[in-house]
Image (cartoon, rainbow, N blue to C red):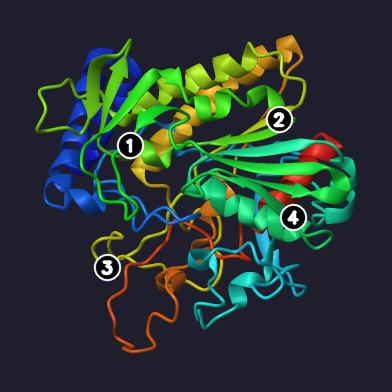
Amino acid sequence: MLFHWKSWWKSVYKQNHFVLKLGFSIFLVGLAFRLLFSRSDVISEVQETPFVQKTLFSPPPVSFSLPEVADQIGPEEQAGTCNLFIGDWIPDPAGPVYTNETCKFIEDHQNCMKNGRPDNGYLYWRWNPRNCKLPRFNPLKFLQFMRNKTWALIGDSISRNHVQSFLCVLSKVEEAVEVYHDKEYRCRRWLFPSYNFTVSVIWSPFLAKADIFEDYNGVSTSEIELHIDKLDTSWTDQFKDFDYMIFASGEWYVKTTIYYENDTVLGCHYCPKKNFTELGFNFAYRKVLGNVFNYIVSSNHKGMIFFRTATPDHFENGEWFSGGSCKRTKPVKEGNFSLSEVNKILHEIELDEIGKATAKASEKGLNLKLFDVTSLSLMRPDGHPGPYRHFQPFAKDKNAKIINDCLHWCLPGPIDAWNDMLMEMVLNGQ
């Protein structure tokens, strides 16, 4: 029966648009059924604190496969060409360039060493592209190159996770000084005074205008209201001020959301108590990403803009709310871990939309680049805080039941490699 279901899905995906909608609606009903039996207040993230967003629920246990294109988690490797995103994690005896003791920018929930994680083998690996060399990030050279420049990381809590890593590495040369933060510490800016170089992080989980009804502890009082035709002014108002930007999104789109267009309800994603059309998160994500890239392409921006793909979680033996954990202590080989169906959908949309955008950007002389970390992140199930997002979680009870974080990343940890790749792309045009 499973074989026939998969064959049917692949066939209708390629041949019949109407039946495709019907099939995908079945998928969304499965998602709704699963969520119906979990508390609405835990579907949103675990406690929301500065630099921390709760782990999102994993996709429902659907049994169909998307067409072959969705199973490709990165650009194809071509012999003799350099693709920074295709490679392997190899042993690195040198280890990280910073620790939790030498960097003050690591927030508590990513500070796995301080929180008591007993193993440290996950620190001694580096990303090795197969057809090119990737030098370790050189903070002095980078800061000299970035004199009088501005950077912004725009997105959700993974962007905030990344900015910590970025600041830790750069502060080996000069410690950054915080010059701005909003009331909730979601948007912040730092200055490297000797270089007049600023780094900003902008909280914009949808990249579009969204009314989010969650308190400080992440408890929702109503559905998210997303205006798919309006970009988030928290970043558009500052767009021209930044020389370099890294956009990212994805994870928040699987939350219960009502979609608006022209200030009128258009439909929703999982809203069984509302009499709205179920459109699905894929509809909204594709629509918003298209608007984001259209804005960028029409902007005449003279700097460099990256779009970072969504990173997968690594929950095993359950979900974050049902005892799921991430206990692995070393990387896995390519193919040993599969993308969830939801992550496949998100990634396919990302590759489709940026593929169209980069072609248009190239015609206009704009510098828009794909930063595809999905595949290399998928191979690092060992890099998450797990129970050690909490300080000494088993100090009082070695059998304590702790909610695991298998979405965000320990610092130092695997996402430090993102800085190596960014420097190579910026300085050497990879």
Q: Secondary structure at mark 1?
A: loop
Q: Which residue is mark 1?
A: 212
Name the one closer to the observer, 28 or 67.
28
Residue 423: image x %, image y %? 78, 45
Q: Label 2 to label 4, Cα distance in Å? A: 18 Å
Image quadrant in which the C terminus is located: top right
Q: Residue at x 63, y 45 (%)?
A: 180
For badge 1, the amino acid type reads Ile
185 sits to left or right of 4: right
Say which of marks 2 and 4 sits in front. 4
For badge 2, the amino acid type reads Phe
201 sits to left or right of 403: right
Q: Secondary structure at mark 2?
A: loop
Rendered image: mark on residue 176: 4
Q: Along the polypeptide, which appears first: circle 1 or circle 3? A: 1
Q: Along the polypeptide, which appears first: circle 4 or circle 3? A: 4
For badge 4, the amino acid type reads Ala
**Mark 3 nearby-residue class (10 Å; few <14, some 14–19, many ≥20):** some
Rendered image: mark on residue 323: 3
Q: Label 2 to label 3, Cα distance in Å? A: 42 Å
Q: Residue at x 50, y 46 (%)?
A: 186
Q: Label 4 to label 1, Cα distance in Å? A: 31 Å
Do the numbered discs 2 and 4 sit on residues whose CB atoms are within 8 Å?
no
Q: Which residue is mark 2?
A: 242
Q: Secondary structure at mark 3?
A: loop
